[in-house]
Amino acid sequence: DIQMTQSPSSVSASVGDRVTITCRASQGISSWLAWYQHKPGKAPKLLIYAASSLESGVPSRFSGSGSGTEFILTISSLQPEDFATYYCQQAKSLPRTFGPGTKVDI
Amino acid sequence: QVQLQESGPGLVKPSQTLSLTCTVSAGSISSGGYFWTWIRQHPGKGLEWIGFIHYTGSAYYNPSLKSRITMSLDTSKNQFSLSLNSLTAADTAIYYCARGSWDYFDSWGQGTLVSVSS
């Protein structure tokens, strides 16, 4: 299985801050990576797929970059509704695997 | 916009079989070539892909759970289901159903908590 790691595990930020989250894969996955946002009690939401493609309806302050084994999710200007946990997921091979999550809070 | 809703027992005894159903609305499970997916989240932990089933009936399971899983579709009810047998406390988790492509999961349910306890 491809192992996914994320850093940091949590980040404290303020509205308006730029936030970056790193995701690393245990082996090269090209651009087969997605990012999800998850708020407690809510359905997870797909933000980014294919490492850098923005899902329809997702604000442009979210962006993704990277390929191979290292990927970055950037929130350019944090908004109140962005406080959540963010997960990366590899789509290079089965079983699909997720990172452990990064919690963004105040 | 497609919506998914999980249903099933909140409490199951060890060694029993868990049966969960996902009801899909505003979209047909037999069209579009989607993969109908189950994912779980252990308390305080990350997400674990359980497996998915294509509208043609082809299913793909996580090897770590494969011997205990069966997924199925009910196109007449626009539902898909997960059966997980030989439950232990380690199966206590929030179970999510989702719609996806082969690669990514673009619509999720809100999840249902399943506790395994005697």
Image: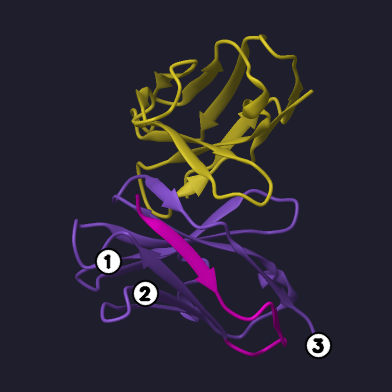
Above or below — where is A86 with respect to B44?
A: above
Give the mark nearest the N terminus, 3 or 2. Answer: 2
Report x, y in % for residue A38.
60, 41
**Mark 3 falls on what kind of element?**
loop
Q: Residue at x 26, y 77 (%)?
A: B75
Would you say the residues marked 2 and 1 are in contact, meaning their CB atoms lie under 8 Å apart?
yes
Q: Of circles 3 and 2, which is in front?
A: 2
Locate residue B94: give its quadrant. bottom right
Nearer-the-camera pick, B70 or A37: A37
Which chain gets the yellow colouring? Answer: A
Give the number of the disc on residue B79: 2
Q: Is residue B13 left or right of residue B22?
A: right
Residue B20's spot in the image, x, y percent? 52, 77
Q: Quadrant of residue A39?
A: top right
**From the viewer's perspective, is residue B11 above or below residue A55?**
below
Task: Point out which mark residue A31 bears.
Answer: none
Q: Which residues are magenta?
A: B1-17
Q: CA distance from mark 3 to mark 2?
A: 29 Å
The hue in which chain B appears in the rendered picture of the protein: purple
Residue at (45%, 70%) from the top-left corner? Answer: B22
Kind of residue indicated by mark 2: Gln
For mark 2, name the chain.
Answer: B
The dot on residue B118 is: 3
* Point 36% across, 64% down: residue: B25
Q: Residues within 10 Å of mark 1 (few under 14, many from 20)?
A: many
Quadrant into which the C terminus of chain B falls = bottom right
The amino acid beneath tag 3 is Ser
